[in-house]
Amino acid sequence: MSATAQPISNVATASAITKPPLKIFRNLQSKIALTPMMATVIVVFIGCSIWTIVYSLTSSRILPTSNFAKDFVGIDQYTRLFTSSRWQLSVRNLFVFSIFSLAFTFVLGFLLAVFMDQKIRFENTFRTIFLYPFALSFIITGIVWAWALNPAFGLQKSVRDLGWTNFTFDWIANRQMVVYSLVIAAVWQGTGLMMALMLAGLRGIDDEIWKASRVDGIPKWRTYWSIIIPMMRPVFITALVLFAAGAVRTYDLVVAMTGGGPGLSSQFPTVYVYEFMFVSNLAQGLAASSVLLAAVAIIVIPWAFYEFGQKKS
C-alpha cells in the first residue's frame, strides 16, 4: 500500500507547488505598503466628498447642522445657486478664462517646443528661462501682473512717459476686460510647463520619420501638421486634462491679482465657494463646491478611461 500511495502524494505536492497564489495575495508586500495611502484616499477624499454633498442638501449656515432631518431642504441650495447672477457671472468668467488661457498656452507652448527641438545652442538656458514663471506661485504671479497692468504706475504709465500719451491699457480696471488680464497672467505662467510637455512628446518621435519625410520632399510644416501632431495626441490629451482641471481650480491668481473686482466683475466659482463656505452660508458654499467637483470629474474620468483603458487593452 505504501508503494501505491507514494505517487499520489508526489502529485499532490507538485500541484501545491505549481498552483499560483490567489489574486488577492499577489504582490502582498506592495499592497500592505500602500494600505495607509489607500485609507487616506478613502477617508479624506471620498469621505469628505460625500460629506460635502450630504450637507449641501441642508440649510446649514455658519456651522454644519446638528439635526440633519430637521434642516434637510433637498436641492434648494442648488436651485438658488443656478439662479444666482453672481454664480452665473462666475461660471461665464471661468468659461472665458479657460478657453482663452488653454488656447494661447497650447499654441505658444507647442511653438516654443518646436523651437527648442531644433537642437539650438544654449538650450538649457532657454529652457530655464521659459520654465521660470512656472516655479512661481500664483500668488506671486498675480501680484507681479497686478503691478505691471496697473494703469497708475504699470505698463500704461511707462508707455505714456515715453511719449505715447494717448496709449491706454487698463484691462485690470475695466469690468469688461478684467478677465482677459487674468488670461495674460495664466498664459505667462503656464506656457513653460506646456513647452516642457510638448518637448518631451517631440523628443519621443522616431528620427526615421523625419528622415523619411525629408527623402519624400515633404515640407516641414506639413510633417508637423499631418504626422507629428496626430502622433502626439496622448500628450495633447494629458496636457488638456491637466490645464483644464487647473483652470477650474483657479483661485489664488484671482485673489492676488484682482480680488474678484472691480466690483464682482472677475468673480470665479472658487471665490464664490470660499466666500459662502467660510463667511455666510456653509450649505450654499458646499453646493457650489459639489458642482465644481462634478466639473472636474467630467474632465478627469473620461481621460482616465481613455488612458488606462488603452494600456489595459
Image: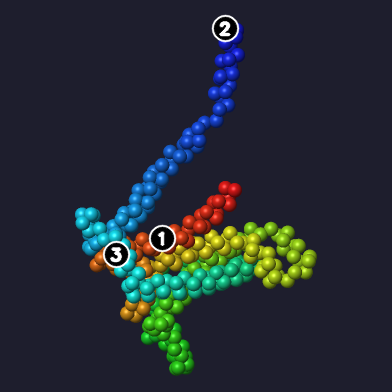
> Are the residues at dot 2 and dot 3 in contact (C-beta closer than 8 Å)?
no
Please tell me how crowded label 1 is: few (under 14), some (14-19), or many (20+) other residues with Cα within 10 Å.
Answer: few
Residue 265 position, x and y percent, is: 36, 78
Q: Is residue 221 above or below residue 149?
A: above
> Are the residues at dot 3 and dot 1 in contact (C-beta closer than 8 Å)?
no
Residue type marked 3: Asp
Circle 3 sits on which residue? 76
Q: Residue at x 39, y 84 (%)?
A: 174
Q: Quick one: 222 or 111, which is closer to the camera?
A: 222
Circle 2 sits on which residue? 2
Q: Earlier in the sequence, mark 3 or mark 1?
A: 3
Numbered disc in front, either 2 or 3:
3
Image-based side of 283 in relation to 218, left or right: left
Circle 1 sits on which residue? 294
Q: CA distance from mark 2 to mark 3?
A: 80 Å
Please tell me how crowded label 3 is: few (under 14), some (14-19), or many (20+) other residues with Cα within 10 Å.
Answer: some
Residue 122 position, x and y percent, is: 61, 67
Numbered disc in front, either 3 or 1:
3
Residue type marked 1: Ala
Q: Earlier in the sequence, mark 2 or mark 1?
A: 2
